[in-house]
Amino acid sequence: MQYVKRVDVFIMKIMKIKTITFHYAHNYGAVLQAYALQNTLLSLGHENKIIDYKQKKMHVFVKYGWKSNNNIITATIINILVLVRYREHKMRFYKFEDFINNYLILTKHYKSYEELKLNPPDADVYLVGSDQVWNIYQEKIRSEVSFLKFGDENIKRMSYAASMGTCDLSVEQKKLFGNLITNMDKISVREKEACDFIMNNYGIKSEVHLDPVFLLKKDQWAGLAIEPSFRNKYILCYPLSFTPLLNETIKKIKGLTGYEVIVLTANIREKVIGDIYIRNAGPRELLGLIKDAQIVLTSSFHGLAFSIIFEKNFYVFPLVFQSRINNILDLLELSEQQVSTLENVNLKSINYEKTNTILSGEISKSIDYLQRLKEE
């Protein structure tokens, strides 16, 4: 009888979790954080599928349509530019599609919010996260989905490391956010600013946890990576935007080291100085490029995150909305790696012993939160 009881308890603790996130975007951070969260949940003994909700099918070319975010003139210009480097864009497109279809476990496809509401997936827990799933600037329908406004009311609704993008909201946006967040049973966010914003404006407690990519070990990411064929030592530049300071930094580091500069970009025209431009890399190639780089220059949060995971010397360049970058740099005591002037660039090696000690404690807190899903 004791054996039966133990088995019953074990079975009860296996939770069926369905996750909502931006898993379909052809964005390195989006698909890799989705992969990381899913594999962490599976390793903890949960059942997990990502809800395959996307209203628009991804295409190599931008589709025309007055109702889309891109008007017909913009779409035409983008498509002309894509044609210039069509082969590279096509390769990149199918690498992302391959990763999404073969490395993520998905539910049936939902092409509309109405379809999701009418036939929601069965679950013990609906979990939203991570990435900028609570960016209130997105369309209202997407917000309804990201705040789990579907399914049986008895299903628990929780978030993990949800990011707001920015807490600088208008009065109307604050009201909308407040109406949506009351739907949640338990809240985990990625930035301390979001935690403070939710408490100060709505009196709701939340916890701050790491982006899911930090929850997998370096060896796990290395095993997934496709290593580049370059034999020479190189500086990897992975910018989301261009600043003159970036080019000045590239010139300085190349002058000090003599390394080649590889630029990872999806742009047709590029202002960033480089020796080699890579426009066809998929998620696995990104991992390999960061893993084998000597130095990484980036303005991407996940470019920064994987630089830390692979223990690289790196420098970060500021963006307009970068609270998530500031948060992780402050947390891990790496703020000096943010470049404001060329004087910040000195090629001093990062003390990863200290960084990893801090990171290990934060990983334990984050894993503990996901383990407690069984007890909620």
Image (cartoon, rainbow, N blue to C red):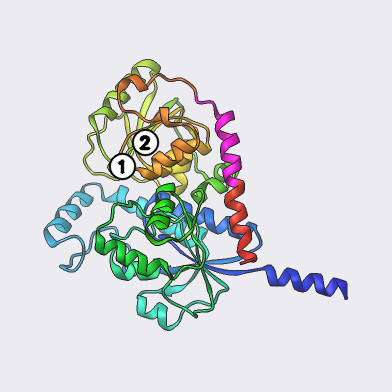
* Towards the viewer: 247 or 223: 247
The stretch of residues the image draws in magenta is 350-363
Q: Position of residue 174 (x, y in %)?
A: 30, 61
Membership of 270 in magenta stretch? no
Amino acid, disc 1: Leu
Answer with mark 1 or mark 2, whichever residue precedes in sequence.
1
Residue most extreme to the top: 256
At mark 2, the secondary structure is: strand
Q: Which residue is mark 1?
A: 240
Looking at the rendering, in which quadrant would you find the N terminus?
Answer: bottom right
Which residue is rendered at x = 24% and y = 33% of the image? 243
Q: Position of residue 116 (x, y in %)?
A: 41, 77
Amino acid, disc 2: Thr
Question: Toward which corner of the image does residue 353 lie, by quadrant?
Answer: top right
373 sits to left or right of 271: right
Which residue is rendered at x = 58% and y = 73% of the image? 124
Which residue is rendered at x = 17% and y = 67% of the image? 65
Residue most extreme to the bottom: 118
Which residue is rendered at x = 42% and y = 51% of the image? 196
Looking at the rendering, in which quadrant would you find the C terminus?
Answer: bottom right
359 sits to left or right of 190: right
Label 1 neighbour load within 10 Å: few <14, some 14-19, many 20+: some
Q: Which residue is mark 2?
A: 298
Numbered mark located on residue 192 in the image: none
Q: CA separation, marks 1 and 2?
A: 7 Å
Q: Is residue 73 above or below residue 221?
A: below
Confirm or deny contact between disc 1 and disc 2 (CB under 8 A).
Answer: yes
Q: Position of residue 61 (x, y in %)?
A: 25, 58
Residue 228 seen: no
